[in-house]
């Protein structure tokens, strides 16, 4: 009894403390495998600040020399604008990227983290539901 | 015995949490009263003055931590332990539920119920805003910035979380308010925002619009309309509160005019605030959509 009441109270606190962004352009879960994490390391070739989601384009060079093109999607421009990140991404620099892949199997994904050459990590994703208050 | 007594409390907790999450935010009554107690400005010719910026130009975002890392995590309603759950799961489904749970719905004639349902279910493919098509009127919602002269009113729009389905990319409407009739050519056009003319009814500005394309929707859940739709908007102001309401007349498909719930906007108090310049829209998602989740 006490455990369930504590959970309900914690959930209510979480709801009141954080407001979900509304107005999704389409359901992310229709496009991406949100529980899967993949990664690559590549050079950014383009940063497209567009609606409804910003896009980063990369080229990964495999150990055997083959090139793989990647396209990553992120939050809307407003989120980056509010966080002062509109000029944080540099074409020509190398990033370590983790992402949730698209359901279509293409080299496209929803970015989770981007680690730049300066070692700083930018996380742009949805919270882990197993840790809803990110504690 | 103990387990059966626990279950109603758990369900109640979930219901309370869900209701809090899904219900629209309630304005503080005292704040609303304060905004309306301000004298309503008027133009030199005595008309209600709607000029102003009725939105936010962006707020403070997430700041970097001490190591320079930035974390922007979209949060969602926590999952029930018995629920299938993964990142963005509740975020996406709550968004859809929220759009459909408005009790004020357009009442379609029975012969169109199947069409509405089909459009809703297949919205990923059939809702043209997914391809960056304009939201159209009245789906674009209340204006963000208004410039009013003696003879015309200019309505400008910007994206506002939760208020519109798609960012209205640098959308504006220039509307004569001298009581003229519709232009005979423009009123027969087929555009997302139609041909609009305005007139005063006391302190209410009434904007009448015709000449619509039927490619746009009234709302996200498959609410289509014909190109013979007529939209009547009513603008009022109480102190620093703008009140916008749209009434949709489409007798070919609706059983009665749809009086949309009035939208209230508060005047931005910062005299230096400027509307957000929207970036262009580009569809790069539809090719990768794997199901009909919306």
Image (cartoon, coloured by chain):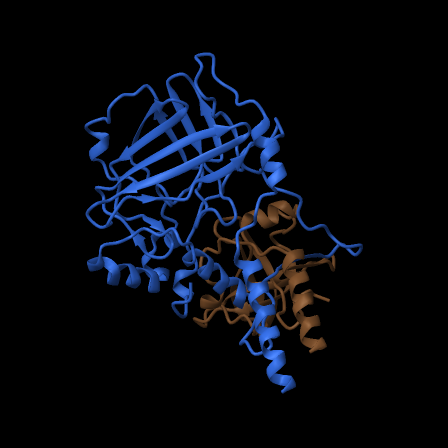
Q: Position of residue B23 (x, y in %)?
A: 53, 55
> Can residue B116 be seen at all in this image of the molecule?
yes
In the orientation shown, which residue stands out farthest toward the bottom?
Answer: B1
Q: Nearer the viewer, residue B196 or A107?
A: B196
With respect to residue A26, does B292 lie above or below? below
Give the colour in which the image draws chain A.
brown
Q: Quadrant of residue B244?
A: top left
Identify the residue shown where x is 38% and y is 22%: B202
Q: Nearer the viewer, residue A57 or A82?
A: A82
In the rendered view of the protein, which quadrant contains the N terminus of chain B? Answer: bottom right
Image position of A42 (left or right of B153): right
With respect to residue B12, does A13 lie above or below? above
Identify the residue shown where x is 22% and y is 50%: B253
Q: Position of residue A17 (x, y in %)?
A: 67, 56
Q: Nearer the viewer, residue A54 or A117?
A: A54
Identify the residue shown where x is 40% and y is 54%: B103
In the orientation shown, which residue stands out farthest toward the right?
Answer: B66
Image position of B132 (left or right of A128): left
Q: Quadrant of residue B154?
A: top left
Q: Position of residue B170 (x, y in %)?
A: 45, 37
Total numbered labels placed on residues in the image = 0
With respect to residue B32, does B112 lie above or below? below
Q: Quadrant of residue A59?
A: bottom right
> Can residue A61 be seen at all in this image of the molecule?
no
In the rendered view of the protein, which quadrant contains the C terminus of chain B? Answer: bottom left
Chain painted in blue in the figure: B
With respect to residue B5, does B256 lie above or below? above
Identify the residue shown where x is 63% and y is 79%: B6
């Amino acid at each position: 009894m006490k455990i369930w009441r504590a959970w309900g109270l914690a959930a209510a606190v979480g709801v009141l403390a954080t407001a979900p962004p509304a107005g999704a352009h389409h359901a992310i879960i229709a496009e991406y495998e949100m529980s899967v994490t993949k990664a690559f390391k590549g050079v950014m070739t383009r940063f497209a600040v567009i609606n409804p989601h910003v896009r980063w384009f990369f080229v990964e060079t495999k150990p055997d020399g083959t090139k793989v093109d990647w396209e990553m999607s992120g939050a809307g421009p407003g989120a980056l604008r509010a966080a002062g990140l509109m000029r944080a991404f540099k074409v020509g620099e190398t990033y370590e990227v983790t992402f949730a892949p698209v359901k279509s199997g293409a080299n496209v994904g929803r970015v989770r983290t981007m680690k730049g050459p300066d070692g700083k990590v930018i996380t742009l994703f949805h919270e882990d539901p197993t840790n809803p208050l990110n504690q | 015995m103990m387990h059966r007594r626990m279950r109603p409390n758990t369900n109640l907790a979930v219901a309370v949490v869900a209701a809090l999450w899904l219900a629209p935010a309630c304005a503080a009554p005292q704040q609303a009263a304060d905004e309306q107690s301000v004298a309503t400005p008027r133009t030199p010719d005595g008309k209600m003055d709607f000029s102003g910026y009725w939105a936010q130009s962006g707020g403070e975002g997430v700041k970097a931590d001490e190591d320079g890392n930035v974390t922007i995590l979209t949060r969602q309603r926590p999952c029930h332990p018995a629920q299938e759950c993964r990142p963005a799961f509740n975020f996406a489904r709550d968004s859809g539920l929220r759009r459909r749970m408005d009790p004020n719905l357009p009442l379609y004639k029975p012969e169109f119920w199947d069409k509405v349902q089909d459009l809703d279910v297949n919205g990923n493919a059939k809702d043209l805003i997914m391809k960056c098509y304009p939201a159209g009127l009245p789906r674009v919602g209340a204006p963000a910035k208004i410039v009013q002269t003696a003879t015309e009113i200019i309505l400008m729009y910007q994206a506002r979380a939760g208020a519109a389905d798609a960012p209205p990319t640098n959308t504006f409407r220039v509307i004569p308010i001298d009581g003229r009739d519709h232009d005979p050519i423009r009123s027969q056009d087929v555009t997302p925002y139609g041909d609009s003319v305005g007139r005063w009814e006391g302190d209410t500005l009434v904007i009448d619009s015709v000449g619509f394309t039927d490619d746009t929707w009234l709302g996200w859940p498959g609410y289509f309309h014909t190109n013979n739709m007529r939209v009547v908007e009513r603008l009022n102001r109480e102190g620093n509160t703008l009140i916008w309401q749209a009434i949709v007349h489409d007798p070919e498909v609706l059983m009665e005019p749809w009086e949309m719930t009035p939208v209230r906007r508060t005047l931005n108090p910062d005299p230096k605030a400027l509307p957000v310049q929207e970036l262009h829209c580009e569809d790069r998602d539809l090719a990768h959509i794997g199901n009909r989740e919306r």
